[in-house]
Image: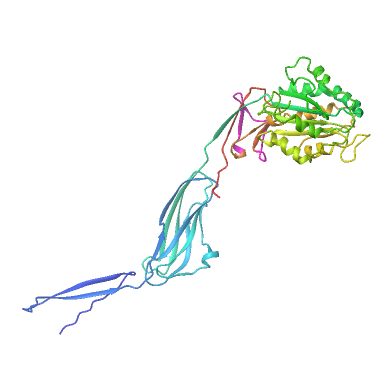
Amino acid sequence: SATFAATYEPRTAEASEVDVLIHSNDPDEEFTIVHLQGTGLAPVIQLDPWSYDYGAADIGCAVALPVAIRNVGNTDLIVTDLTYLTASSELSFDALEAVNGPLPWTVAPGGEVEISAIYLPTDDLRDEGYLQVSSNDPYQGAAEATQIGQGQLPPLVTETFVQDSGLADLLFIIDDAAAMEQAQARIAASAETLLDSMVDAGMRFHIGVITARSPIFQGAILTEATPDMEDAFISQLPGVGGTGDGQPAEMAWQATRSGADAGPGGAFLRDDALLAMIFISDGPDTSPTDWSIYLSDFQALKTDSDDLQIHAISGDYPDGCDGASAADNAYEMSVATDGLYLSACAINWNPHMEAIAERVQRDFRGCELSQFPDPDSVEVSVDGVPLTERWAYNNTDNNVTFDETPEPGAVITITYRPMPSCPG
C-alpha cells in the first residue's frame, strides 16, 4: 500500500469538491477516481449598495442612504469597526446605535444590520467617500462601499412685477348724531390731507360715504379723477341731527351686501382693491350682532382677508374722552385687522388722515416672492436699473419692500436663488 494526503483549506464559506484520478498498471482499472468534498465554515460580509451615486444633490439638504451590512456566510459575523475614508467633510455615516446598539455587532447567517451613509453638500464640487466595515470575515477583513455625489445650487429665479398705482376702496361710516358737529368739522378740515396724500402716491381709489343710520351712499362714488374732489367729499358729510343710537357696524354690513351700494358686483367694490372701512363716531354702537360675525362677513368680501382694513376715529378706548364714547365694535375689528384706532378728541385730525392714507397704500409697497430666497442672492432692478439700496427683503412676509414706492407702471425685476427645499 501507499498513502497520499489531500488537504482542504477553504478561504470562505463555500462548498468544494474535486476528483483525484489515480493512474496505475492495474489491467482491470487503469484509472481509479477518489471523490473529495468539503464545506468551509465562515462568515461572509456583503454591503448593499456597494457603490452609490447620490447624483446632483441640493446644497444644504442632507441625503441619508441606507446601507445594509449582511452576513451571507454560515457562521456568525462579528462587525468590529466602522470607518469613513474621505477628503470631504460633506460625507459621513451614522451607525444608528439607538437601534443597533454599540459595537461590536453580531450578525447571524442570513441576517443584516442597517446603517446610514449621509451626504450634506455645502458646495458644488464632486465628493467621494468610502465606508469601511471591519469584521471577522476571513476573506475580506475590511469590506468597502463607495459613495459619490455633487452638490448643486438651485437655479436662479427671476420674477417681474409691474408697479400698480394702488387700488383702494374706502368706505366711510360717519355718525350723524347731534354731538358729531365738531367731529364732522374736523373731518372737513382734514379732508385735503387725506385726498392729497392718496393722489400724490398715485393711488386709484373709490370713496363712498354712508351714515350710522343708513347704508345708502350720501352721493356719487369719488375717485382720483373727481373734479373738485375735496368739496365733493365734504358735501357728502351727513350733517347732524341723529338720535345717538347709531348702528355703524350694521350699516356697513347692509351696505356691503349683494345689490347694495358697496356690495359685490357694484361699481364701488373692486375684486383686486384693498377694502378699507373707516368708522367715525363719538357714541356707542348699538348694532344687533356681535362684531366677530360682522368682521367675518366683511373678510368674506375679499379673496385674501389681508385685503380688508378697518380703522376708526372715536373716543379713546375703553373709557372715552371729552364726552366721546369708545366704539367697541370698531375697536375690536380694527385690532383684528391691524387697523388704526385714533382719538376723536384730538384737535387736529390731519395726522389721522395722513396715517390712514399711508396705511391703505401698504399692499402695493412690496413685491411678494413665490419662493423663499437666499437673502444674500436677492438682486432688484426697477425699469432695468439695478438698485443696490433703498429696498429690503422681509423674511417674515417673504417680500421685497421699498423705502420709496416705485412710480406707477414701473417694471420691478427681482432675481434670487431659492433656498433649497429639502425633503421632510
Residue located at (50% from left, 68% from top): 103
Relative to the observer, which residue lies in front, 312 or 57? 312
Residue 302 image point, x, y percent: 68, 33
Residue located at (77% from left, 34% from top): 310
Q: Which residue reaches farthest right?
A: 322
Q: Is residue 249 above or below residue 100?
A: above
Residue 423 image point, x, y percent: 54, 48
Relative to the observer, which residue lies in front, 5 or 157? 157
Left-right relation of 125 to 16:
right
Relative to the observer, which residue lies in front, 54 or 121? 54
Residue 254 location, quadrant: top right
Q: Is residue 37 above or below residue 247?
A: below
Residue 401 image point, x, y percent: 68, 32
Left-right relation of 264 to 414:
right
Left-right relation of 191 to 272:
right
Q: Which residue reaches farthest left?
A: 27
In magenta, the rendered stretch is 376-397
Residue 198 location, quadrant: top right
Residue located at (73% from left, 23% from top): 206
